[in-house]
Image (cartoon, grey):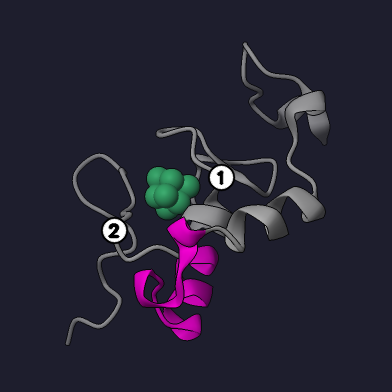
Amino acid sequence: MRQNQRTCRSCGDEFAVNERQMERLLASPAFAPELRVSEAEYESRLAVCESCPKFHGGTTCMLCGCLVPVIAHLKSKNCPYPGGSRWAAWGEA
Ligand code: SF4
């Protein structure tokens, strides 16, 4: 299965972010509650990424290099998918 995954040419598994590092990031002022989307929107974003061909290794968007489980919390971030954000449908009626 692993051979089917596209890997980053620069980074190996040693650059994977562990849960402790994630918790430390999310506790920083950059992730203050007022800067975050709702939990429901966060979960929706993750679900969209999980079905995206640009999602790699359960953590990384291959278009922007972002750690999706981290940046999907932020109101200021958006999906860089060509032709339009795949997150855009959230909240639109
Ligand atoms: S392109 Fe958008 S939907 Fe796909 S992994 Fe990146 S952020 Fe997620």
The residue nearer to you, when weighing 12 against 84, is 12
SS for dot 1: loop
Magenta stretch contains residue 1: no
Image point (33%, 54%), residue name: 77
Image point (72%, 29%), residue name: 4
Q: Residue 76 carries which label?
A: 2
Q: Mark 1 vs mark 2: which is more N-terminal?
A: 1
Q: Where is residue 47 in the image (x, y as percent from the top left)?
A: 54, 68
Where does the N terminus fall, quadrant-wise? top right
Q: Distance between the residues labelled 1 and 2?
A: 14 Å
Horizontally, residue 38 falls left or right of residue 5, namely left
Q: Give the range drawn in magenta.
A: 29-48
Number of labels in the image equals 2
Dominant SS type (magenta):
helix
Whether residue 34 is visible here, answered yes or no, is yes
Q: Is residue 65 above or below residue 51?
A: above
What residue type is disc 2 on?
Answer: Ser
Q: Where is residue 27 in the image (x, y as percent from the top left)?
A: 61, 63
Image point (33%, 63%), residue name: 87
**Furthest-top residue in view?**
9
The residue nearer to you, when weighing 44 against 15, is 15
Mark 1 residue CB less than 8 A from any atom of ligand 1:
no
Image point (47%, 84%), residue name: 40
CB within 8 Å, label 1 to label 2: no
Whether residue 51 is visible here, answered yes or no, is no
Closest to the camera, between mark 1 and mark 2, is 2
Q: Which residue is labeled 1 in the image? A: 67
